[in-house]
Image: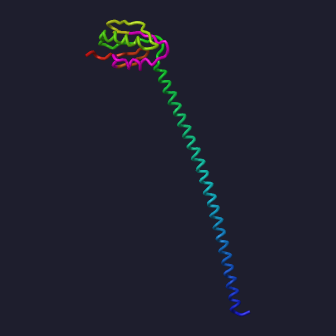
Amino acid sequence: MSREAKEAKEKAKREAKEAKEKAKREAKEAKRAKEADEKAKREAEQAAKERAKREAEEAKRAREADEKAKREAEEKIRANLYEGMVKLAIASPVDYGQVRELEGYLCQVQGLRLVLVGGSVEEGVKIVVSAEKPIPLVGILRELPPVEQVVKKGKEIQVTLKAKQ
């Protein structure tokens, strides 16, 4: 075999070896890339699951907070409902024409009966009403035309009438 043929054979052998090594490196790189892709996919899926879990927990906490707020609002409304005998204290100075006007409006409130109107120099005018069922008496009183201010004071409700013009 000639020298050129040997060199060509060795060159071909080297090139084949280099090509084989290159193919191995590329295969390893492809395998690493595939593993990295799979790892990234697993991490993304895990992150998505964790995010979904966090969002579900946040939604649950928000629902619970909403329910708590609703319960508190209902309790507050119930706390402002009056049933049975309720004393209204009319703040001084009092114009008896306005008291009569207030009596007329109170008689028109559904579920509310006017029981007693009286007073004294020391205590001022008192009106006793009876609510047949729980009603938001403070809110109702605030809406009446002759009423300027309503303040809940213990079991009694203090009513200030508008000044006559």
**Camera-side residue: 113 or 78?**
113
Q: Quadrant of the N terminus?
A: bottom right
Residue 13 image point, x, y percent: 70, 82
Quadrant for residue 165, please give it. top left
Residue 128 image point, x, y percent: 41, 9
**Camera-side residue: 90 or 111?**
111
The colour mode here is rainbow
Magenta highlight on residue 164: no
Q: Residue furthest left?
A: 165
Locate residue 15 relative to residue 88 in the image: left or right.
Answer: right
Q: Give the range drawn in magenta.
A: 127-148
Residue 86 image point, x, y percent: 44, 12
> Residue at position x 68%, y 83% from top?
12
Magenta highlight on residue 146: yes
Locate residue 162 relative to residue 20 in the image: left or right.
Answer: left
> Residue at position x 62%, y 60% from top?
37
Residue 152 image point, x, y percent: 40, 18
